[in-house]
Amino acid sequence: MFCNDDQPMFNIGVIADLLKVHPETLRIWEKHKLVQPSRRNKQRLYSNNDVKRLQFIHYLINEKGLNIAGVQQIISMYPCWNTKNCNGGGNTGQGEPVNINKPCWKEQGTYCFIIEDKADHCSVCPHYNQGCQSKN
């Protein structure tokens, strides 16, 4: 049987029950562009990957104490947030290099293989490098 993790299947009530949040909470997260469920006849339908994104958002808010702005900042560092067919992360026991400071949104207990950080952009910025060279 073929399983497409991006196929919209679950309505807002099912997801709200799963996450133990009010449906309005999901609407607020959508309003802030944290998740973008599909729509069919004006009804929100969530895919398995949407559920994983929502679980990660829920984790960041309830376990890490972030507000919506903080969650937006964190997910902006995940280039794969809206990418279909993201492979997810790895766990530290696999011997593969992972960023152990950044949990993967896709699978609990794993860490993101690739995290985009603003510091990474600065290190390759010609203005940054020019400033470093002039100090040496």
Image: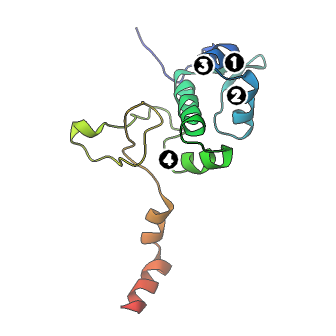
The amino acid at mark 2 is Leu
Upstream in the sequence, badge 4 or badge 1? 1
Q: Quadrant of the N terminus?
A: top left
Residue highlighted by disc 3? 8
> How far apart are the alpha carbons under marks 4 and 1?
26 Å
On residue 79, the disc is: 4
Residue highlighted by disc 1? 12
The amino acid at mark 4 is Pro
Q: Position of residue 130 (x, y in %)?
A: 44, 85
On residue 26, the disc is: 2
Upstream in the sequence, badge 3 or badge 4? 3
Q: Secondary structure at mark 1?
A: helix
The amino acid at mark 1 is Ile
Depth check, mark 3 against mark 1: the one in front is: 1
Q: Are marks 1 and 2 in contact (CB under 8 Å)?
A: yes
Q: Quadrant of the C terminus?
A: bottom left
